[in-house]
Image (cartoon, coloured by chain):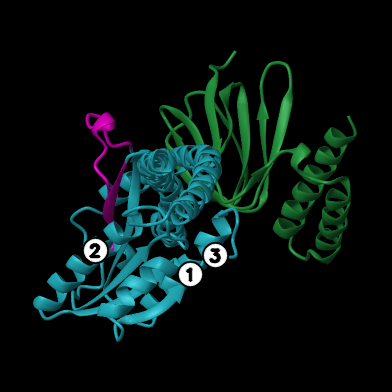
Chain colours: A green, B cyan
Amino acid sequence: MSEAIKVEIVSPEHLVFSGAVKSVSVPGVEGYFTVMGTHAPLMSILKPGFVSVESEKEATSFYVGGGFADVSDSGVTILAEEAKTASDFEPSQIDDAIKQAEGLLAGAETPEAKNSAQALLDGWKNLALEVKD
Amino acid sequence: MPSLKDLQNRITSVKSTQKITKAMQMVASAKLRKAQEKAEASRPYAKRMNHVLKSLAQSYAGRDDAPVLLGGNGKDKVHLLVVATADRGLCGGFNSSIARFARDHANELLAQGKTVKIITIGKKGNDILRRLFKENIVEAISLREVKNIHYSNAAEIGEKILAMFENEEFDVATLFYSQFKSIISQIPTAHQLIPAQVEADESDKDEQVLNYDYEPNESDILKEFLPRNINVQIFSALLENGAGEMGAKMSAMDNASRNAGDMIDRLTLSFNRQRQAQITKELIEIISGAEALK
């Protein structure tokens, strides 16, 4: 079993999430990546997408509208321009976002663009499921 | 000597003033709590930003290819002062202490033969500085319409400043605001925005420099990071100001209510004295009238 990793998601307005988890995946500008315990120090720009935090029991995802991820010895810090959980959205907003992501996927030409559009779409769909629960 | 009626009128008017100041004090204390919470909530972000900035700056230390926002553009001729004050008055010396601080700084720069440009955020600072530096003020921003300050408000101002920097309208930018220490103490502070100033943090002095991997690379990250850092600095300054304004207003209104109370006491005393004197006078008149009829 890997070591737990400390994750903090902060937006300019408040601290969104803080806790020790198993792994966290982050929408890096060059593709999604997952960080687990004792990761090498890394700093990355984030693109709009979903940060999902996985602990032993559950997975939570947050929408971030771009920002930075700072992975160091002390844990992962995500400096997000905006960070929202499922409960911050209206169901209609999510539906709109899903439609938009579908449009993006249909219009994607390169495999990379397709991948990132698919990831965005999946993220929104996950969020929609969370809202329904 | 004012008549009884005059005294009565003055007492009622002071009483109604006291009611207003008391109400304002209560409103300010309710708002203060909210503003303080917001200011505290924004601190983790600003702190982490500073931390990241520091590790980025360290990797650029001693190199001359640092981005202009970090290393400056090599000139020190035109200074931009961004003065953030409140939009409303009635908060004691809050606005004037920031304005005075900025004024002294501006005079110092002018004495050194530098050019000074001023952006004011908030109406009150503009009112004060306009009297002295009318030609120097390039823009006056008012957040009067904004009830709750959001990050986007700060980002807007930050972008304006950046656009000016890119057009080479100034070389060095400094932000003036009031740091919220407590309800009774707000400290006017100057913080240099461009070139970015790395704050020394006592707590992580002995932390070693990590060898970071950068994705995509250092300079791209800095390009994204530095403008955002400016926005965050402005945002936290605005929030600190918000809390400071309410704190200052609370103590100013507390003083005002107390003064009004003292004044009412004094007026009531002289009102009673005069009333008694009048009664005594009337009694004497009646008694001496009765004496005369005997």
Image location of residue B6, percent across then percent down: 45, 57
Residue wearing tag 3: B144
Image location of residue A51, percent across then percent down: 65, 39
* Chain designation of label 3: B
Instruction: Tell whether label 1 touches label 2 (CB within 8 Å).
Output: no
Which disc number belongs to residue B159? Answer: 1
In this rendering, which labeled residue sits more in front, label 2 or label 1? 2
Q: Say which element carries label 1.
A: helix
Residue drawn at x 57%, y 51% is A81
Q: Say which element carries label 3.
A: loop
Residue drawn at x 35%, y 59% is B95
Q: Which residues are magenta?
A: B185-210
Which amino acid is tagged 1?
Answer: Glu
Query: Is any part of residue B192 visible from this angle?
Result: no
Instruction: Tell whether label 3 touches label 1 (CB within 8 Å).
Output: no
Whichever of labels 3 and 2 marks the residue nearer the N terminus, that label is 2
**Alpha-carbon distance for marks 2 and 1?**
26 Å
